[in-house]
Image (tube, rainbow, N blue to C red):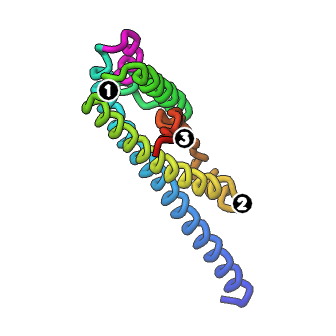
Amino acid sequence: MGFMTTIIFIALLSVMSWAVWTFNRLVRMRNQVKEAWAGIDVQLQRRYELVPNLVATVKGYMKHESGVLERVTRLRAAPEMETGERASQESGLSRSIGRLFAVAEDYPDLKASEGFRQLHSSLVEIEEQLQFARRYYNGSVRDNNNLVEGFPSMLIARIFGFHPAIFFEIELASQRQAPEIDLDN
């Protein structure tokens, strides 16, 4: 082997090593995005399981709560949706839950109910966990998209069909509530 052949061999080996390393990073990022989405899905399922109990608790006080239950039922039974469509549906559910709590303010007996308070507390906790899961997912999406769209890794991404992921932004019901302020203490 001549000197020039050795240089060409080393250059090709370097390019191939870089391509394999980049491909493995792309796979790792794609899997991280999938894992992060699974975390969001767990919290959404927890919320879906809680909302019917919340609706049942308020049912005796309100007549227009059926829309919330229908929306939860539809989301539970829905086939896989694109991230943007899912975010839109979840934001609608969050607005409905926020309206439930706003209307509940007009019913002191309901607000004083231990069951209602526990459900409210559980929902706030679930939505905090959902917010953490959403942040992790969106961070994973950002890292994935930087790798997929950045040069020169985009060359490998295009060859092997890696695509940017979509961010997941929803409006949480707990973000729509006014904070409680006690000025008497």
Asked if residue 159 shows in the view, the reply is: no
Q: Earlier in the sequence, mark 3 or mark 2?
A: 2
Give the residues drawn in magenta, as a range: 61-73
Q: Residue furthest top?
A: 63
Q: Is residue 88 among what the camera can see?
A: yes
Whether 150 is drawn above or below 95: the answer is below
Q: Nearer the viewer, mark 3 or mark 2?
A: 3
Q: Crowding near pointer 1: few (<14 within 10 Å), some, many (20+)?
A: many
Q: Amino acid at mark 3?
A: Phe
* Mark 3 or mark 1, whichever is nearer to me: 1
Q: Magenta part mainly helix, strand or loop?
A: helix
Circles 2, 1 touching at the beta carbon (< 8 Å):
no
What separation in Å lies between label 2 and label 1 (alpha carbons)? 50 Å
Judging by the rendered image, the residue that carries numbered circle 2 is 151
Q: CA distance from mark 3 to mark 2?
A: 25 Å
Q: CA distance from mark 3 to mark 1?
A: 25 Å
Question: Which one is nearer the viewer's eye here, 114 or 100?
Answer: 114
Residue tagged by mark 1? 54
Q: Residue furthest left?
A: 115
At label 1, the amino acid type is Leu
**Do the CB atoms of the residues marked 3 and 1 lie less than 8 Å apart?**
no
Residue 124 pos. (x, y %): 40, 40
Name the disc covering residue 67, or none.
none
Q: Which residue is mark 3?
A: 168
Q: Secondary structure at mark 1?
A: helix
Where residue 127 sits, quadrant-wise, is: top left
Residue 48: quadrant of the picture: top left
Which residue is pictured at 68% across the width and 78% down the height? 11
Going from the N terminus, do you reach mark 2 or mark 1 first? 1
**Lower position in the chain sequence, tag 3 or tag 1:** 1
Q: Is residue 19 magenta?
A: no
